[in-house]
Image (cartoon, helix red, strand yellow):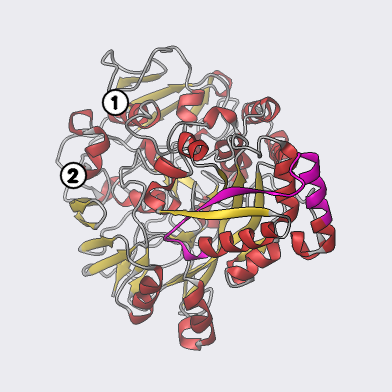
Amino acid sequence: MRRSRTTGLAAAAAALLIAVTGCASGSGQGSATGAGGGDAASAEYNAGLDGVVNPSTHAGGTVTYQLSSTPDSMDPGNTYYAFMWDFSRLYARSLTTYQPAPGQDGLKVVPDLATGLGTASDDGKTWTYHIRPGLKYSDGTPITTKDVKYAVERSNFAPDVLSNGPTYFNQYLVNNSPDYQGPYKDKGGGLNSIETPDDTTIVFHLSQPFADFDYLVANPQAAPVPQAKDGGADYVKNIVSSGSYMFQSYQDGVGATLVRNPNWSADSDQIRKQYPDKIVVQFNVAQTTIDQNLIAGNATMDLGGAGIAAATQATALSNPSQKAHIDDAQSGALAYVAISTAVKPFDNLHCRQAVAYAVDRLSAQTATGGDIHGDIATGILPPTVNGYRQYDDPYATPDHKGANSPEGLAKAKDQLAQCGQPGGFTTNLSARSDRPNEIALAQAVQASLKQVGITANIQQYPSGKYFTDNAGAPAFVHDHGIGLMMMAWAADWPTGYGFLEQILDGQTIKASGNSNLSELNDPAINQMLASAIGNTDSGARTKAWGDIDQAAMQQAPLVPLLDRKDPLYRPDSATNVYVTSAYGMYDYLNIGTK
């Protein structure tokens, strides 16, 4: 998931990878307790990594979330930020979701709308789900599988209306409707490759085996949307809830208020509770202000889940009472610099490799406050994702210092000479204006590139538009000469495919909401990805993810910086707090207040 993302760690891949040879999965019910499994934990440093801090069934009060930017969208079918995938589960139930529990238990995928995990047939090319009968939306109308089908159609086949989110369904559903242009243009009944024989059954027909399909339908694109209530891009203003909370109000650029959904039934939902009376979300609050509000108890959660700012970190870690409220979470995300293969001179491999040698990754780590924000990365897959393996860093320099070491300087200059730019050149480097740690990373990258004659002018854009209008819009990137782009990426689900595909596969490049910022479109890598996900041998798939990582690094589409960790702050007032490995941040599903 972009962009925090979006994590997903990995060990659970083996627990879920249902044989694509066509077996049905068990119901896998989630925990019936308010905060899922895990031992209760006292307020201590890192207590929320493996335990539940302040477990409580207390109902009432207001939970306040603050965000330093605006979301890409609160529409479950038009969002790709990890924090929104986490938060949207309060009002959008997908076919499956992640078990609410701390630590590795949070990686287990369990049925949500569905009565069980998927039944695979046709050698893994057909997946069937049954949803629970009697479910209702917040307006009292029934939820049917036709609404799930419609949700997939609107989120994957109408990029001119809803541009955010991944493109897996578009890529892998059988293309028996080649002229289908999404539900806003096509009025002929939708995709033939998704069948709804009755109101509780849905069948997906894929063009090839897809071993990770139960993970795919956990993303909010598989949360039902009633076609009669869909306003396209304006649906975000009047979202109809299928979850435990519903929207009381929404104001674009300002925030939202959620209240209990009276038509949600606890009997149909083993993972959600209704603890707070009200959930308030406030947008565009400065990160340092959010930090201080958390410390003072004036906010419950930092919605962005990217950790306290470096300016707050030093004071908080040196104060024992504040440090006891911090969890340094493995986010499962890679912070990196994407290099555009479509912007000159980076269409030349040697110019990209010059950047890879020149970037001082040690200074980048230092700029964000040291190893509390992550370990120096040397490959694309983080160690937490299934398929990760160590291999020799193809752009190794002493102590990762890049052009700030004599060896790195010489290697970078050699590559510049080979790409016909011996004196260096000027380019633009994009970063998100409301993410101070990302700006700090960009400045460190800028400084190290300067050592080899590459001038990278930093261009700042807001998070809410970064992928729709700026770095994720190839035409804008080309027109504005943005050769380098700051990025943080986590797995859409905890396997190598869930991490790699949307940032390396040329088929995923789109006009807006693009995650393949480098616009890498290497036929060999595209084929490696497609072949691996269709392989029914889980061991072969795992090996393939590492092979793809290594092959892609040879093309230098990006410079890995940090396998990110995020120091998250939880105030005393927050209950049922723990880090979920599924999203690499606090699990927002059942947060309450004392």
Q: Is residue 70 left or right of residue 381?
A: left
Name the spot of residue 539 as percent of width and height, x first.
72, 37
Query: SS class of the residue under badge 1?
Result: helix
- Front-most of 89 and 203? 89
**Which region of the structure is painted magenta?**
410-437
Query: SS class of the residue under badge 2?
Result: loop
First of labels 1, 2 by sequence position: 2
**Residue at the (49%, 47%) spot, across then down:** 2
Residue 23 appears in the figure: no
How packed mark 2 is, by other alpha carbons closer than 10 Å (few <14, some 14-19, many 20 or more), is: many
* Magenta segment includes 226: no
**Gap in Å between the C-alphas at discs 1 and 2?**
17 Å
The residue beneath circle 1 is 146
The residue beneath circle 2 is 138
Q: Is residue 416 above or below residue 35?
A: above
Name the spot of residue 271 as percent of width and height, x first.
36, 52
Residue 384 appears in the figure: yes
Q: How many marks?
A: 2
Q: Where, quadrant-wise, is the C terminus in this rendering?
A: bottom left
**Residue at the (63%, 59%) spot, across then down:** 445
